[in-house]
């Protein structure tokens, strides 16, 4: 995960990449796209869920700062939570959660990852990611997809 | 304009209306979490730092709402570059 990927990007380019990534999964993994956004004068507020196969869901909360260059909007992610869960037999199993809104004890910054065992119990401590390794939504979607593929393979 | 991503840039009055709606939605969310957890949003960071409150997905949503609301209300017009 390169830090460069989090540099400001034009909104048009960002949307194009976002839509392209979702299209890659819409024919076999994403069942319902409930992720929406609001364009604000100074930012973009995202919230919602990508409902996927076998009860897997990717929950997104994100605020992107905006600025304008020659009349075009550019965006840069300031705050995020990307959370993967699975609804299984009436339970909600946590799979992984990334966020940057609260620094963990001993971490130099707030970018970190919570990991969970197969029953959803958290494996302490959260892993520090820092400014070099935090993921974008597409990478979290890749991770959710890989999780599903591993489940598919192990159930055969 | 809560919607699937679409260009082009909306009119300024649409952006202002979006901002107002998001601010109101986030303020309502903060109130709901304060009621649920019995903690004032202004004490959230201190409660987490002390360990009295655990960082769950719900609490992270609360924090993002708080941080975003602060950013949106603290910002003036977007700077030109």
Image (cartoon, coloured by chain):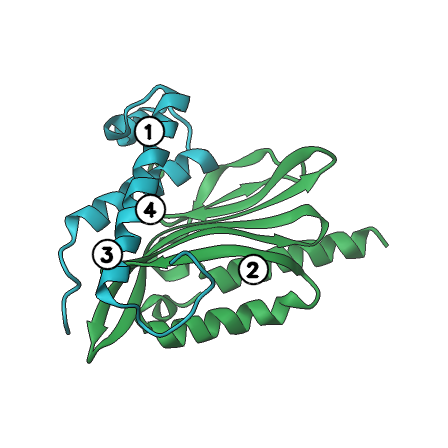
Chain colours: A green, B cyan
Do callouts 4 and 1 mark residues in contact (Cβ within 8 Å)? Answer: no
Judging depth in this view, the residue of A49 and B17 nearest the camera is: B17
Q: How far, Cα to Cα, is label 4 from label 3?
A: 30 Å
Left or right side of B60 for A26 = right
Instruction: Return the disc, 3 or 1, that comes first in the chain's sequence.
Output: 3
**Residue A26 image offset from top left, x and y in percent:** 64, 66
Q: Quadrant of residue A127?
A: top left
In the structure shown, which secondary structural element does the residue marked by tag 2 occupy? helix
Q: Chain of mark 3?
A: B
Do callouts 4 and 3 mark residues in contact (Cβ within 8 Å)? Answer: no
Q: Would residue A121 be visible to someone looking at this image?
A: yes
The residue labelled by disc 4 is: A110
* Label 1 Cα neighbours within 10 Å, binned few <14 / some 14-19 / many ≥20: some
In the structure shown, which secondary structural element does the residue marked by tag 3 occupy? helix
The residue labelled by disc 3 is: B16
Residue A141, disc: 2
Q: How far, Cα to Cα, is label 4 from label 1?
A: 24 Å
Q: Residue at x 41, y 47 (%)?
A: A99
**Residue A42 image offset from top left, x and y in percent:** 23, 60
Q: Which of the two discs, 3 and 2, sits closer to the camera?
A: 3
Work out whether disc 3 and disc 2 sit on a shared chain: no
Q: Residue at x 45, y 75 (%)?
A: A16
Instruction: Return the disc, 2 or 4, that comes first in the chain's sequence.
Output: 4
Work out whether disc 3 and disc 1 sit on a shared chain: yes
List the single residue furthest toward the bottom.
A70
Q: Chain of mark 2?
A: A
Q: Which of the two discs, 4 and 1, sits closer to the camera?
A: 1
Q: Quadrant of residue A70?
A: bottom left
**Residue A150 image offset from top left, x and y in percent:** 72, 55
Judging depth in this view, the residue of A134 and A8 nearest the camera is: A8
Q: How far, Cα to Cα, is label 1 from label 2?
A: 31 Å
**Residue A135 image offset from top left, x and y in percent:** 45, 59
């Amino acid at each position: 995960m390169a830090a460069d990927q989090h540099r400001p990007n034009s909104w048009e380019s960002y949307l194009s990449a976002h839509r392209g990534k979702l299209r890659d999964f819409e024919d076999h993994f994403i069942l319902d796209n409930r992720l929406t956004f609001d364009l604000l004068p100074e930012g973009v507020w995202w919230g919602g869920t990508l409902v996927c196969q076998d009860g897997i869901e990717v929950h997104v909360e994100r605020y992107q700062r905006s600025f304008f260059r020659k009349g075009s909007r550019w965006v840069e992610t300031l705050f995020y939570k990307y959370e993967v869960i699975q609804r299984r037999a009436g339970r909600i199993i946590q799979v992984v959660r990334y966020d940057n809104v609260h620094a963990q004890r001993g971490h130099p910054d707030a970018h970190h990852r919570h990991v969970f065992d197969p029953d959803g119990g958290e494996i302490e401590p959260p892993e520090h990611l820092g400014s070099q390794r935090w993921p974008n939504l597409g990478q979290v979607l890749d991770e959710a997809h890989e999780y599903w593929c591993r489940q598919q393979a192990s159930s055969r | 304009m809560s919607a699937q991503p679409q260009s082009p840039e909306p009119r300024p009055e649409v952006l202002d209306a979006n901002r107002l709606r998001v601010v109101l939605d986030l303020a309502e969310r903060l109130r709901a979490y304060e009621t649920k957890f019995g903690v004032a949003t202004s004490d959230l960071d201190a409660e987490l730092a002390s360990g009295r409150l655990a960082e769950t997905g719900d609490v992270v949503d609360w924090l993002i709402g708080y941080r975003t609301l602060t950013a949106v209300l603290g910002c003036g017009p977007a700077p030109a570059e």
